[in-house]
Image (spheres, helix red, strand yellow):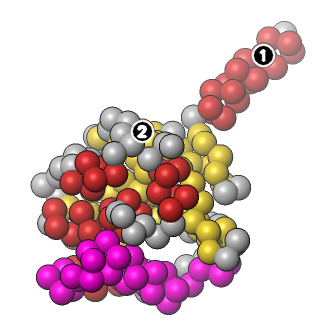
């Protein structure tokens, strides 16, 4: 009987472990569901700066893709998960990185999106701690919703904003080249 219980527990554990992907010392789920849309982990990696791991990032899509420009332009449900792995990340540093990311993603043309970018920055005003998790979720006809530790912070509409936002990680000037490649499953 003990052997049977142990075997069942072992198989259940294997199923649980395989439902996640370890990256940057944290586990990212292989699937996420938002508003009845199931998204699969397309790829995941770590954002580094000066050889320091800052966050683990995962890109979730309904269908696997390695084409960054198609993903940026797609009017399909998708999300990016950011799991903070460093105590060095602060809300101020995150907002600076967001500013730089939008500048790079839009080739310096942030003016048309300035009010939406400001609203997005406001989501990072509260203290950021190691192991905080941000989910940035795009649902067509809803917009981009941001969650911190499963608590919804707000939603920003507009495909123009979605393209610029996902471009932070997937454009020709991404936040981190290696992270972009990892998110694209390469």
Q: Up-down: is 124 above or below 139? A: below
According to the image, label 1 marks what residue?
Answer: 7
According to the image, label 2 marks what residue?
Answer: 40
Q: Identify the residue shown where x is 69% and y is 72%.
A: 52
Q: Which structural element holds mark 2?
A: strand
Residue 158 occupies which quadrant of the picture? Answer: bottom left
- The crowding category of the residue bearing disc 2, from other C-alpha atoms within 10 Å (few below 14, some 14 to 19, many at least 20), is many
Q: Identify the residue shown where x is 45% and y is 87%.
A: 96
Q: Main secondary structure of the magenta part?
A: helix
Q: Is residue 31 left or right of residue 103?
A: right
Of labels 2 and 1, the one closer to you: 2
Q: CA distance from mark 2 to mark 1?
A: 29 Å
Segment colored magenta: 87-115
Q: Identify the residue shown where x is 21% and y is 49%.
A: 74
Q: Nearer the viewer, residue 149 or 65?
A: 65
Q: Earlier in the sequence, mark 2 or mark 1?
A: 1
- The crowding category of the residue bearing disc 1, from other C-alpha atoms within 10 Å (few below 14, some 14 to 19, many at least 20), is few
Q: Is there any visible trace of residue 150 in the rendered image?
A: no
Q: Nearer the viewer, residue 42 or 134?
A: 42
Q: Up-down: is 137 above or below 91? A: above
Q: Is residue 111 magenta?
A: yes
Q: Nearer the viewer, residue 41 or 133?
A: 41
Q: Identify the residue shown where x is 81% and y is 20%.
A: 6
The image shows residue 36 at horizontal and vertical percentages of 28, 40
Residue 155 occupies which quadrant of the picture? Answer: bottom left
The image shows residue 180 at horizontal and vertical percentages of 47, 57
Extreme residue toward the right, this view:
2
Q: Is residue 110 left or right of residue 19?
A: left
The image shows residue 116 at horizontal and vertical percentages of 22, 79
């Amino acid at each position: 009987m003990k052997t049977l219980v142990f075997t069942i527990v072992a198989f259940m554990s294997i199923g649980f472990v395989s439902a996640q992907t370890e990256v940057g010392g944290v586990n990212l789920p292989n699937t996420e569901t938002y508003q009845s849309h199931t998204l699969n982990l397309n790829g995941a990696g770590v954002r580094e700066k000066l050889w320091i791991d800052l966050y683990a990032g995962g890109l979730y899509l309904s269908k696997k893709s390695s084409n960054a420009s198609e993903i940026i332009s797609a009017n399909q449900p998708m999300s990016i998960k950011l799991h903070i792995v460093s105590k060095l990340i602060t809300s101020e540093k995150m907002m600076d990185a967001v500013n730089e990311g939008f500048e790079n993603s839009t080739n310096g043309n942030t003016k048309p999106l300035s009010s939406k970018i400001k609203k997005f920055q406001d989501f990072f005003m509260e203290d950021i701690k190691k192991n905080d998790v941000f989910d940035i979720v795009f649902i067509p006809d809803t917009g981009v919703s941001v969650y911190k530790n499963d608590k919804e912070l707000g939603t920003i509409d507009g495909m123009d904003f979605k393209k610029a936002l996902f471009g932070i990680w997937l454009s020709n000037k991404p936040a981190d080249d290696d992270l972009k490649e990892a998110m694209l499953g390469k």
